[in-house]
Image (spheres, helix red, strand yellow):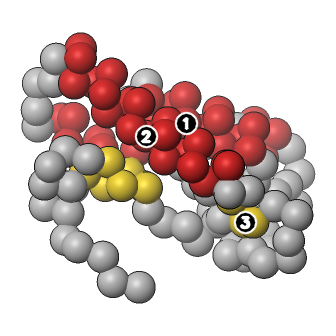
Amino acid sequence: MISPWMRSGNLEQFLSTRALSRAERYQLCTQIVEGVAYLHENRIVHGDLKASNVLMSDRNIPQLTDFGSSIIREHSLQFRSSGIEGRFTLRWVASEMLQDGKAKPTFNADIHSLGMTILVR
């Protein structure tokens, strides 16, 4: 897969180098939520949402990346390893994902991670 180079870096880097107004932050959050909603409407669980997996375009548009833990619900196709060890960043992962070593990413876990991503400063 080839994608454009995102000079603005990931969401955390982007926010640390810019002073955004409340309206700009709201728009940014809305765009990220719309991206996750699109995935979920198409039965895709991202599985590893976090600030470092949101890249910022030159036009300040967030791009969801790193679909290595994603699964397509109700189908056998999945893009992840069999275990969860080392697959998630604790700050963003939903607690149910840590309860046993065989937990699969879920829509609810994505929403938890989305909330944590939106809270990043």
On screen, residue 116 versus residue 10, left or right, reads right
Of mark 1 and mark 2, the one earlier in the sequence is: 2
Q: Are marks 1 and 2 in contact (CB under 8 Å)?
A: yes
Visible in this render: residue 28?
yes
Task: Give coordinates of residue 13: x percent, y percent.
Answer: 22, 45
> Is residue 113 placed above or below 73 in the rendered structure?
above
Q: Which residue is mark 1?
A: 114
- Residue 91 occupies which quadrant of the picture? top right
Q: What secondary structure is found at the residue carrying circle 2?
A: helix
Q: Which residue is mark 2?
A: 32
Q: CA distance from mark 1 to mark 3?
A: 16 Å
On screen, residue 19 versus residue 47, left or right, reads left
Q: What secondary structure is found at the residue carrying circle 3?
A: strand
Task: Give coordinates of residue 88: x percent, y percent.
Answer: 61, 54
Q: Which residue is mark 3?
A: 71
Q: Nearer the viewer, residue 72 or 38?
A: 38
- Which residue lies most toward the bottom here? 1
